[in-house]
Amino acid sequence: MGLFSATAIVMGSMIGSGIFIVSADMSRALGSPALLILAWLVTAAMTIIGALSYGELAAMMPKAGGQYVYLREALGPLWGFLYGWTLFLVIQTGTIAAVGVAFGKFLGVFFPSVSASHWIWHIGRVPAVPVGPMVLGNMEIGLNTANLAAIIVIVALTLVNTFGVRMGSAVQNVFTSAKVLALGAVVLVGLFASNAAAIAANFGAGWKNFWAGAGWGTLHSVQVGVGGPTAYVGLLTVVAVVQVGSLFSSDAWNNVTFTAGEIRNPKRNLPLSLAIGTGVVLLLYVLCNFVYLSVLPMAGSEGAATVVGRGIQFASEDRVATAVMSQAFAGYGAKLMAGAILVSTFGCVNGMLLAGARVYYAMSQDGLFFKAVGRLSEKSKTPVNSLWVQCVWTCLLCLSGSYGQLLDYVIFAVLIFYVLTIAGLFVLRRTRPDAVRPYKAIGYPVLPALYIVMALWICGVLLRYKPQYTWPGLILVLLGVPVYLLWSKAERVAVA
């Protein structure tokens, strides 16, 4: 793969359906147009700093496995394993399942028979089980036409990727280009379909309304946990709380590092692809939110009958982008948006399938995953077994109905691993000062340190105010410790 394909993986993995829906929930929590944009700018700053920091590690260690390798080399094999363990269990596979099912749901716009409520084999329902501030269960298990569509896409793209990285990256190039054009089209809508009433409500004379509710002294209500008490917090805290949505929408940019062993001139192309890919996507994300604000008022009523009346806060099923397109193109706007999301989700699934399998391959090479997963196909030189193991587990998550809940649980864990990896940059500068570094992180040590401080602040806020997103993820990671000890012991016995 060259620079274009590597950049396509960065952009393709990032651009899922999140940007089209999370702004509704963020708007309800923030209540201010300025804070909505600020939240996305915080995400953009953190993601770009993270990408620039990873660029040094990627150029220094251009090996298959990416972040797993960086953690292993900087902090030790246990930390690498815990990352790989969580990645396989839910970060990568759960995200693929969720995006795949989103593909199925939006396919239903064109084919109504494709629906999460159209069951082929309904195994049963797991009842809701309150556990402290969390609610476990509360999901349907079985095969419906929406998750069947997801499974078909996952299996088909896994098969495509078994033919080699060239085939997988070719598919990625096409769909990433289409996704960028789709996002660009949403941005253009803002230029030609802006709504005078929405602009007046969200910006006002001299942008007075834009800044309303964004003062340092303004308090914002946040519900603690599920069904917990309401707390009133300041600007920095509420912006940290809503990062669950925006950071998740921008996640998976690191997937390109997993494929480092198959990228041409990785010491140059990996850092460049990270910088270009994250920069372009995040610029489009911020612009999309300005488009939302120019077409729909932020404030709305949940019971309103019109798209404008519901506003951004209460867009139907939180589909803000669909509401914007419906307002701009009455009659067929929803289908245009659904088509864009289908393209986006298809490319995202392909990019994550291609990248994730390389981590489990690297773990197997270290004796920390099934041996068969560590074999390359003689013909295609790709980790075919790793691709299929990933495919099987992902399809089971599609059937289980649990992927959405699991994804909520690992947002905190994902952020912790980013912090640990960037901390590893400091460790390696000290322990391996003479290592060849074709690229050095821009702004080191200030920018990487700033990322760590910002991320730890967000983690602390989430631990306090959103325990349903934090403690389960932490427990999931820690469960990997005994698994690592058992696997390491079995490997030592096998070698002896």
Image (cartoon, rainbow, N blue to C red):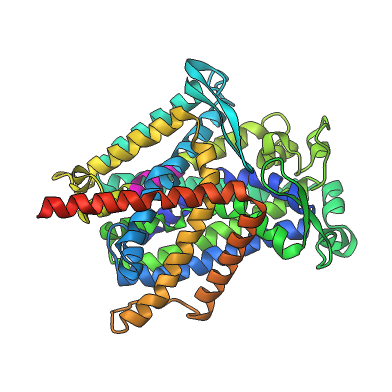
**Residue 277 visible in rendering:** no
Vertical order, 440 against 71 (above or below): below
Q: Is residue 121 magenta?
A: no
Among the 4 quarters of the image, the one containing residue 63 = bottom left
Q: Nearer the viewer, residue 144 or 322?
A: 144
Our reading of the magenta stretch's main secondary structure is helix
Among the 4 quarters of the image, the one containing residue 390 = top left
Q: Nearer the viewer, residue 416 or 491?
A: 491
Q: Is residue 11 left or right of residue 359?
A: right
Q: Is residue 351 magenta?
A: yes
**Residue 393 visible in rendering:** yes
Q: What residue is shown at x 65% (from left), y 56% (from top)?
A: 464
Residue farthest toward the bottom in the current orientation of the protein: 434
Image quarter (top left, top right, bottom left or bottom right) of the C terminus: bottom left
Among the 4 quarters of the image, the one containing residue 309 = top right
Vertical order, 152 against 355 (above or below): above
Label count reads 0
Q: Position of residue 21 (x, y in %)?
A: 64, 43
* Numbered range of the magenta stretch: 348-356
Q: Is residue 101 left or right of residue 435?
A: right
Residue farthest toward the right in the current orientation of the protein: 205
